[in-house]
Image (cartoon, grey):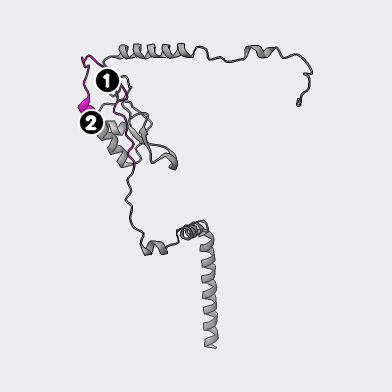
């Protein structure tokens, strides 16, 4: 239906119970605050930030430069740090049984993170105040770059043309191999034919 026309029928009464209101937002805010306070009192003296998480890299090339908190430590990392995987949760350490260590740098970083946590860990503390916030938050260290003067050699290099050439070579590698083999065979045949003519 379009334009400023009358409704064909008046059977549109079912729409009057489908509006979504948000009138309980202030009450939800207060309820969440009370729940957070009750949870902090229930788990006291444990920290309210949850379990210790590993430092991992994001997936895909778009995010793999960023370091973030992962799901849990791998079994290899726990073994290297001397922590039993069954006792890890009782110590406040998250465990991920599916994780695989693909780089030595991340493995060593998380083992050092566990060893540092063990030095700070206090079993059943009796202090008056529980620790608030995330447990040993992961800090994303940005890479540093040094700026230098552009040399004449760098100016002479045509970066875009070089990249296009490399991409073309990688894309046409199979075809160029066949063409080179064919040209080599033709050249050998011509040389053989020329040698036969020379003997005559």
Residue 131 badge = 1
> In this orientation, does residue 41 appear?
yes
> Which one is closest to the eye, mark 1 or mark 2?
1
Query: At 78% from the left edge and 22% from the top edge, which residue is drawn?
Result: 5
Query: At 51% from the left edge and 83% from the top edge, which residue is drawn?
Result: 195
Depth check: give the residue in front, 36 or 81.
36
Residue 159 percent coordinates (x, y):
45, 59
Query: At 46% from the left edge and 60% from the top edge, which residue is drawn?
Result: 162
Horizontal relation, residue 174 to residue 105: left or right: right
Depth check: give the residue in front, 18 or 99.
18
The residue indicated by pointer 2 is 116
The local secondary structure at tag 1 comes to loop
Asked where in the image residue 34 lies, by quadrant, the reply is top left
Examine the structure image and report whether residue 129 is included in the region drawn in magenta: yes
Badge 1 or badge 2: first in the primary sequence: 2
Which range of residues does the magenta coloring cover? 117-142
Query: At 35% from the left edge and 29% from the top edge, which residue is drawn?
Result: 72
Asked where in the image residue 116 lies, by quadrant, the reply is top left
Depth check: give the residue in front, 171 or 49.
49
126 lies above or below 185: above
41 lies above or below 57: above
Q: Quadrant of the N terminus?
A: top right
Residue 25 badge = none
Q: Residue furthest toward the front?
A: 4
Using a 10 Å C-alpha cutoff, classify the residue at mark 2 as few (fewer than 14 neighbours), some (14 to 19) or many (20 or more): few
Marks counted in the figure total 2
Using a 10 Å C-alpha cutoff, classify the residue at mark 1 as few (fewer than 14 neighbours), some (14 to 19) or many (20 or more): some
Examine the residues drawn in magenta and state their main secondary structure. Answer: loop
> In this orientation, does residue 82 appear?
no
């Amino acid at each position: 239906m379009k334009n400023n026309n009358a409704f064909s029928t008046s059977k549109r009464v079912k729409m009057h119970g489908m509006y979504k209101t948000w009138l309980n937002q202030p009450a939800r805010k207060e309820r969440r605050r009370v729940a957070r306070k009750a949870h902090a009192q229930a788990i006291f003296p444990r920290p309210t930030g949850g379990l210790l998480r590993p430092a991992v890299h994001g997936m895909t090339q778009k995010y793999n430069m960023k370091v973030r908190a992962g799901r849990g430590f791998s079994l290899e990392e726990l073994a290297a740090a001397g922590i039993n995987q069954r006792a890890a949760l009782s110590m406040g350490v998250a465990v991920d049984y599916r994780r695989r260590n693909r780089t030595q740098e991340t493995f060593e970083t998380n083992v050092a993170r566990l060893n540092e946590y063990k030095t700070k860990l206090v079993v059943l503390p009796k202090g008056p105040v529980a620790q608030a916030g995330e447990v040993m938050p992961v800090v994303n260290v940005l890479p540093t770059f040094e700026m230098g003067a552009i040399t004449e050699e760098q100016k002479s290099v045509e970066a875009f043309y070089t990249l296009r050439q490399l991409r073309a070579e990688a894309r046409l590698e199979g075809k160029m191999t066949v063409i080179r083999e064919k040209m080599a065979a033709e050249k050998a045949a011509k040389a053989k034919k020329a040698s036969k003519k020379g003997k005559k």
